[in-house]
Image: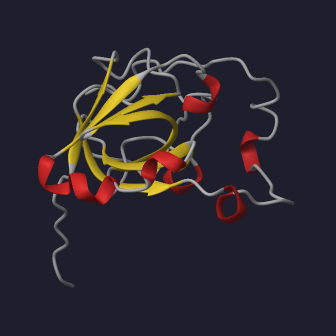
Amino acid sequence: MQKIVYKPIGIIHSSYKQVEGVPIQGALSKNSKGEVEVFPEYKAGLKDLEGFSHIILLYHFHLAKGYSLLSRPFLENKKHGIFAIRAPKRPNPIGFSVVKLEKITGNLLYINEVDIVDYTILLDIKPYVSKFDVRTGTKDGWLTKKIMDDREHKADNRYSP
């Protein structure tokens, strides 16, 4: 199989300097601001992005070391398969977050609802489109009873380096 190599397109900045204390989902953290610094050579790719209220950030979990195929998620102490949870320690440590886009100034994107550690390497940006990205009739698996309210949940140290 061929080797896959991605080239970073920017850096995500936030107030979170370590994994512990980061909101486990940005949608539950309505006042968690950050910035996306897109490298100058990719600035032209931001054209027309300001018309979207939300964007999807794909990034590298740079603090994740190793992985296990069974792991304990933040909302439970029972182990689940890594593909049934959103833990950072994965075979390919790729993360994604839907964030609110507040404004764009040059190559800087000002965002809210951030659940990302400072200085995270950005791999890609995609627009969030409700007609494409929202599904009806979905099931939330083992999480059904865990996400009954909108309380903000923070990461503990179980995935810290």
Image location of residue 90, percent across then percent down: 37, 51
**Residue 15 drawn at (x, y percent):** 34, 15
Q: Residue at x 66, y 65 (%)?
A: 132
In the image, 97 versus 144, the foreground residue is 97
Q: Using the image, determine if residue 124 lies above or below residue 74.
A: below
Q: Position of residue 14 (x, y in %)?
A: 33, 22
The residue shown at (30%, 42%) is 61
Quarter of the rendering containing residue 137? bottom right
Q: Which quadrant, please, contains the N terminus? A: bottom left
Does residue 150 appear to the left or right of 72 in the view shown? right
Name the residue at 75% across, 23% down: 150
Q: Residue at x 32, y 25 (%)?
A: 160
- Against 139, is 50 above or below? above
The residue most toward the right is 137
Instruction: Give 149 or 42, whichever is nearer the viewer.
Output: 42
Q: Is residue 115 visible?
A: no
